[in-house]
Amino acid sequence: MDRGGVIVGLIGSAIQASRSPALHEREAAAQGLKLIYRLIDLDQVGLGVGSLESLIQAAEWMGFAGLNITYPCKQAVLPLLHDMSPDARAIGAVNTIVLKDGRRTGHNTDVSGFSAAFHSGLADAARGHVVQLGAGGGGAAVAHALLAEGVERLSLHDIDAARSERLARSLCARFGSRRAEVSVDQAAEIAAADGLVNCTPVGMAKLPGMPLAETLLRPALWVADIVYFPLETALLRAARSLGCRTLDGGGMAVFQAVGAFKLFTGLAADARRMRRHFAEMTVADEGRAPAP
């Protein structure tokens, strides 16, 4: 059935490896919808976060139904919106904008995306104390998801201490005092924690490496990473070598896309089909990768 067509896009930095275009376009095709997904890569066009308003305005002029927003724009975009969903407002970060009737409405599907991935891969994981690295836009969403999933105590570490403090205050206001705190002794906290989540960009293909010293890992710790390109980051590889339970960023990438697809098109995405498409792309990428 032909359901017409829509055009959407993604604004962010160094996003050429994003799987969002293929995920959305293939799911739309399976549902008889013509969907075009464009990448608006700040690095490729030589623009910075200060150009966000002009880029969003251009998307409106060209009839875009919406935009995904990623690093480093998830918080910078907030003043440019007319309205936000309750979750996006509480989190203070947006990863999806619906453009309709001259209005820009911000949403956050990263929360539901991480929660669904967590249920899928670490449903029975201990939730007493978790250390989270990174308190930016993606980190804010993951932190809210972790506390909503029952994590009793969340320790936040970010290179920008003020950002960690702001997020901790926001989380405590929403979930209760002492549920979130700023990490003051990373080594000691990880030594006593049940889980560790990386919400920094360290580990991405463009920023390889480890977000913390490998010696801080131990077998009893479960480790999650929201980076999905590459799917096996240095952190996850090191954690698996020790016998840690791990969760890669693929699940969050797929499930946040499931939520965004519904917002853009009004149609419910088939999550299983999208996960299968993601897996196929991962296998294809691995086949093209040079031997180590």
Image (cartoon, helix red, strand yellow):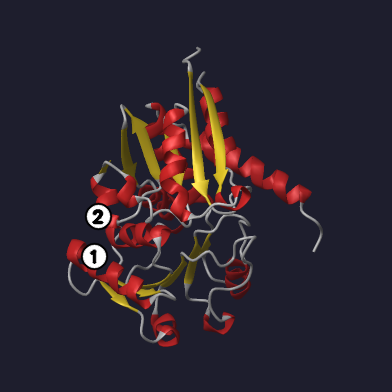
Q: Is 13 drawn above or below residue 202 in the view shown? A: above
Task: Examine the rendered structure and indicate whether residue 33 appears above or below residue 15.
Answer: above
Residue in the image at 27% along x and 41% along y: 82
Observer-nearest of 65 and 280: 65
Quarter of the figure with residue 125: bottom left
* Amino acid carrying mark 2 in the image: Ala
CA distance separating discs 1 and 2: 8 Å
Residue found at x 49% / y 66%: 200
Label 2 residue SS: helix
| Residue ID for mark 2 | 90
* Neighbours of disc 1 within 10 Å: few (<14), some (14-19), many (20+): some
> What percent of the width, then of the height, locates residue 179?
24, 71
Tag 1, which secondary structure?
helix
Residue 170 seen anywhere in this rendered image of the structure: yes
Picture layout, residue 189 above or below residue 239: below
* Residue name at image x 57 percent, y 84 percent: 215
Q: Are marks 1 and 2 in contact (CB under 8 Å)?
A: yes
Extreme residue toward the top, this view: 1
Is residue 152 visible from the viewing direction of this image? no
Looking at the picture, does residue 266 appear above or below residue 55? above
Give whichever of 245, 155 is nearer the camera. Answer: 155
Q: Judge from the rendering whether residue 247 lies leftward or rightward of residue 208; answer left or right.
A: left
Disc number for residue 170: 1
Residue 241: image x %, image y %? 63, 72
Amino acid carrying mark 1 in the image = Ser
Position in image of residue 186 (x %, y %)? 42, 83
Question: Looking at the figure, which quarter contains the C terminus?
Answer: bottom right
Which x, y percent locates residue 139? 40, 62
Q: Earlier in the sequence, mark 1 or mark 2?
A: 2
Neighbourhood count class around disc 2 (C-alpha, 10 Å): few under 14, some 14–19, many 20 upward? some
Q: Look at 59% across and 65% down and name the residue there.
A: 203
